[in-house]
């Protein structure tokens, strides 16, 4: 269990964890802890928001928090989002799309997807942070977004086959019953903490990008790649953040 947790942290973040096992059973079971790693990433963003808000206000704090989460993950998911946008919509054939996704250069679709994702994340945090329950709402948004977002690749990998015979898409397979239960319980607990009785709304919001991305990936490249899994994290994080922020705004209006 400890080896799998270390592998998950080392795989999804730039946090040093020593000589973590990135092959074999530890990495095979690391997916169970992906949502928990999301809580760690969200915590980094929350600390940065709290420290910066006191000095420069919610807008600067929102930018700092988003940048902190990007840095601590090495822009892993943002890179996947940009490459997926370029590949899925920038090529005429399956082979060309996969080739584009492996190209390190940033195209128009990728730039638009990346800019839109970052701007919306900043806007959501800045708006929530300016409210009367700023810190609490920001905490809920960051925690729910990053935890539930890290469950997206688990669903995509279980649903779709790898699009390539090599690459990161083959490294995450279907989890066993116990590991799936650990990941699902983490997601459920965080959804309830973030939205209470409205947790089902948050989970429904998370399902939309997963289903949409999964269908697009299956139709256009025949399965998932590491970039598609990363894009799933980014898009689900954003969708959940918007849903939690909307629910928080409704609560504030009622009060």
Image (tube, helix red, strand yellow):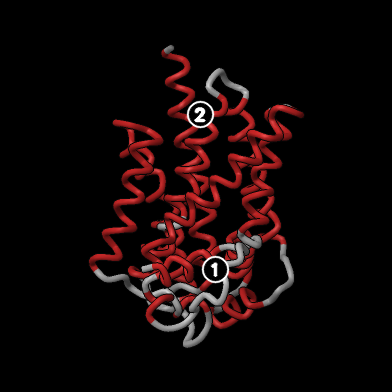
The residues bearing labels 2 and 1 have C-alpha atoms spaced at a distance of: 29 Å
Asked whether, in this view, residue 123 is left or right of residue 241, the answer is right
- Residue ID at (58%, 62%): 13
- Residue ID at (51%, 77%): 168
SS at mark 1? helix
At label 2, counting other C-alpha atoms closer than 10 Å, the crowd grade (few under 14, some 14-19, many 20 or more) is some
From the viewer's perspective, is residue 43 above or below residue 9?
above
Asked whether, in this view, residue 32 is left or right of residue 168, the answer is left
From the viewer's perspective, is residue 25 above or below residue 218?
below
Q: For the N terminus, which image quadrant?
A: bottom left
Furthest residue toward left: 177
From the viewer's perspective, is residue 195 above or below residue 130?
below
From the viewer's perspective, is residue 13 above or below residue 163?
above
- Residue ID at (43%, 12%): 255
Instruction: Indicate which disc, 2 or 1, sits on the residue closer to the N terminus.
Output: 1
- Residue ID at (44%, 21%): 250
Picture quarter containing residue 157?
Answer: bottom left
Picture quarter containing residue 201?
Answer: top left
SS at mark 2? helix
Question: Looking at the image, can residue 85 be seen?
Answer: no
Q: Nearer the viewer, residue 59 or 16?
A: 16
Q: Which mark is residue 234?
A: none
Residue 77 placement (x, y as % from top left): 58, 61
Residue 141 placement (x, y as % from top left): 50, 38
Q: Nearer the viewer, residue 25 or 128?
A: 25
- Reading the image, the residue beneath label 1 is 10
At label 1, counting other C-alpha atoms closer than 10 Å, the crowd grade (few under 14, some 14-19, many 20 or more) is many
Question: Looking at the image, can residue 61 be seen?
Answer: yes
Residue 202 placement (x, y as % from top left): 38, 40
Do callouts 2 and 1 mark residues in contact (Cβ within 8 Å)? no
- Reading the image, the residue beneath label 2 is 136
């Amino acid at each position: 269990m400890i080896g799998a947790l270390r592998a998950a942290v080392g795989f999804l973040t730039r946090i040093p964890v020593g000589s973590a096992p990135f092959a074999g059973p530890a990495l095979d079971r690391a997916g169970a802890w992906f949502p928990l790693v999301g809580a760690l990433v969200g915590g980094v963003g929350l600390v940065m928001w709290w420290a910066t808000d006191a000095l420069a206000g919610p807008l600067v704090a929102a930018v700092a928090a988003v940048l902190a989460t990007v840095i601590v993950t090495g822009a892993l998911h943002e890179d996947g989002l940009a490459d997926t946008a370029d590949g899925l919509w920038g090529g005429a054939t399956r082979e060309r799309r996969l080739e584009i996704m492996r190209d390190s250069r940033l195209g128009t679709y990728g730039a638009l997807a990346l800019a839109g994702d970052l701007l919306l994340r900043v806007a959501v945090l800045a708006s929530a942070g300016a409210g009367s329950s700023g810190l609490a709402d920001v905490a809920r948004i960051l925690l729910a977004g990053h935890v539930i977002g890290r469950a997206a690749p688990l669903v995509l990998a279980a649903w779709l086959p790898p699009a390539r015979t090599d690459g990161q898409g083959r490294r995450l397979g279907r989890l066993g019953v116990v590991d799936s239960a650990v990941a699902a319980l983490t997601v459920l607990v965080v959804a309830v903490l973030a939205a209470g009785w409205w947790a089902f709304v948050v989970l429904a919001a998370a399902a939309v990008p997963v289903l949409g991305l999964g269908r697009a990936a299956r139709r256009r490249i025949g399965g998932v790649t590491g970039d598609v899994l990363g894009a799933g994290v980014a898009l689900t994080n954003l969708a959940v953040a918007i849903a939690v922020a909307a629910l928080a705004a409704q609560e504030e209006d009622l009060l």
